[in-house]
Image (cartoon, helix red, strand yellow):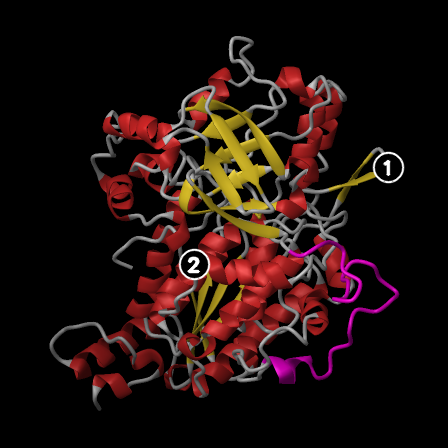
Amino acid sequence: MAEEQLTGIDRNLTTYGDPTFSRFIRRAFLASQGFDEEDLGRPVVGIADTSSDYNTCHGNMPQMVAAVKRGVLEAGGLPLVFPTISLNEILFHPTTMFYRNLLAMDTEEMIRAQPMDSVVLLGGCDKTVPAQLMAAASADVPAVFCVTGAMRTGDWRGNRVGACTDCRRYYTSYRGGEISEPELAEVQQVLCSTPGTCMVMGSASTIACITETLGLMLPGGASPTSGSGDRLRNAVASGRAAVKLARDPVRPSEILTKPAFENALKVLVALGGSTNTIVHLMAIARRAGIDLTMDDLQSASDKIPLLVDCKPSGSVYMEDFHKSGGLPTLMKALETVVDPDPINIERRSVRDRLEDVDPPGDWQNVIRTLEAPLGNTGSLTTLRGSLAPDGAIIKTSAASPELFEHEGPAVVFDSPEDAANRLDDPATDITPDSVMVLRNAGPIAAGMPEAGSLPIPKRLAQKGVKDMVRVSDARMSGTAYGAVVLHCAPEAAAGGPLALVEDGDRIRLSVTERRIDLLVDEQELEARRSRFTAPSLPKRGWAKLYAKHVLQADKGADLDFL
Ligand code: FES
């Protein structure tokens, strides 16, 4: 039999120069695990397991793996679990974004190298699912996505709290002198009350919703909380769906079409979702051979208003979104403006999937309708201008409207470390009108950490200043709030205009005009440009490979050879 016709356990044979021997020896080794011909005649479903003691957001992964395996077995498949890198946002240095592409490579290569007819990708925390989506697009093996699910909320002195919008809110209150250190310590103990992902519409929740929108997850799979029966039933059903896919493949390349991405951008805007999703979608689209641009995002943003009342753009949490119907209900609310044709892993079109879904009920207030939205259009606004010729982004739904039109003097920080050292130094001249500029925090210089939402300097926070304009080539957490201009491209380390800013330069932000400009004349900028020297890059290992090949934010910050 030609190798390309082999299925199940005979896929991707080890090269010994004799395929018959490869099949013989493979069965010999599998016999040691108790597998007989009946087992080995079944469709093989790989299960990518991202368990790790370092990943609290995947704390329920063993339970999820068991549930997926049960679904695979019930449907007559052979489940084979394999480990990949696991990325936790909070326990990784310098940032999980630096490792997203490594996980994408790891996952893609493990799918390609091992025998499987389909794969269930189990992720959750911010960068795991984007990396797995990139891998699925490249490997093009039928894939089902399943997430660990959001944590449930905790309670502090009668106030509902959750990670991590409230982490930042209480920390800001502490810096502003509104709560004491012992009180902050009490809050710390209840912010993450269960295993699971951050329970606001941060990066993890947003990308889960986007994965469901794209069609790579079973309907309703994005929002069940971690540890709930809904979550486990979705995992079992995903196992069964993967066996169906193994027998009757629907490949990611059939699902990841331009209209599917356009629908995803509309959902992103309606969610008031994480800015990080934009970088990830650019990377996934690039892998899928789809030309997705910042203009596509702006076009979605111009049409779609904010519909979901979840923090940080709104007031409640993922469990409330789930109880209100989750992504299917939101898609129903968007039915007249999304493309009805893209299919999902069940080969069902959006039109078909929404047939039996009810529109947002008046018994809830979390998912709104296009006729009565929560906010205006433009929750995510793309910017261009002399500070970001290739684009930047601001999440207006999580920023103070009075700063949408703002001009002020620059206060420049040369790196996240420089900001940490000088932000609270009284010698650093900052007023509420200042525009704080952070550079050398882009993909090449620093792996693009979530450092863009610089804290309000303590002395200003204590005077009640809650928001200021901040501009950087970094990202910010999907759970963060503020008038923060992010992802300026090209970044400073690539010679982008952020490298030329000096303290006291005037910077103008105009959300209405969608511009971020450095108000310095071209002759002066040319003189500064001639003095620019690029920072030295790492000399070995992953850091060297990454810095040499990483693309800018507007291209998804993937490696150029992937
Ligand atoms: Fe893992 Fe927020 S830190 S989802």
State the quadrant of the N terminus.
bottom left
Please report the residue visible at 29 percent of the width from the left and 71 percent of the height from the top: 29
Residue 353 percent across, percent down from the top left: 64, 81
Residue 105 percent across, percent down from the top left: 33, 57
- In the image, residue 172 sits, relative to residue 261, either above or below, namely above
Name the mark on residue 282. Answer: 2
Question: Identity of the amino acid at label 1?
Answer: Gly
**Image quadrant assignment for residue 352:** bottom right
Please report the residue visible at 57 percent of the width from the left and 41 percent of the height from the top: 510
Residue stretch in magenta: 350-377
User: Quick one: 438 or 506, which is closer to the camera?
Assistant: 506
- CB of mark 2 near ligand 1 (< 8 Å): no
User: Mark 1 or 2 closer to N-term?
Assistant: 1
Q: Main secondary structure of the magenta part?
A: loop
Pointer 1 local density, CA inside 10 Å: few below 14, some 14–19, many at least 20: few
Q: Mark 1 points at which residue?
A: 158
- In the image, residue 143 sits, relative to residue 507, either above or below, namely below
Mark 1 or 2, closer to the camera:
2
Q: Can residue 88 be seen in this view?
A: yes
Please report the residue visible at 71 percent of the width from the left and 74 percent of the height from the top: 332
Q: In this view, does 31 lie to the left or right of 131?
A: left
Q: Does the magenta stretch include residue 216?
A: no
Pointer 2 local density, CA inside 10 Å: few below 14, some 14–19, many at least 20: many
Q: In this view, does 51 lie to the left or right of 489?
A: right
Q: Is residue 154 left or right of residue 124?
A: right
- In the image, residue 110 sits, relative to residue 544, either above or below, namely below
Label 2, secondary structure: give it. Answer: helix
Q: Can residue 60 be seen in this view?
A: no
Please report the residue visible at 61 percent of the width from the left and 55 percent of the height from the top: 205
Residue that sits furthest to the left in the current view: 17
Question: Identity of the amino acid at label 2?
Answer: Met
State the quadrant of the C terminus.
bottom left
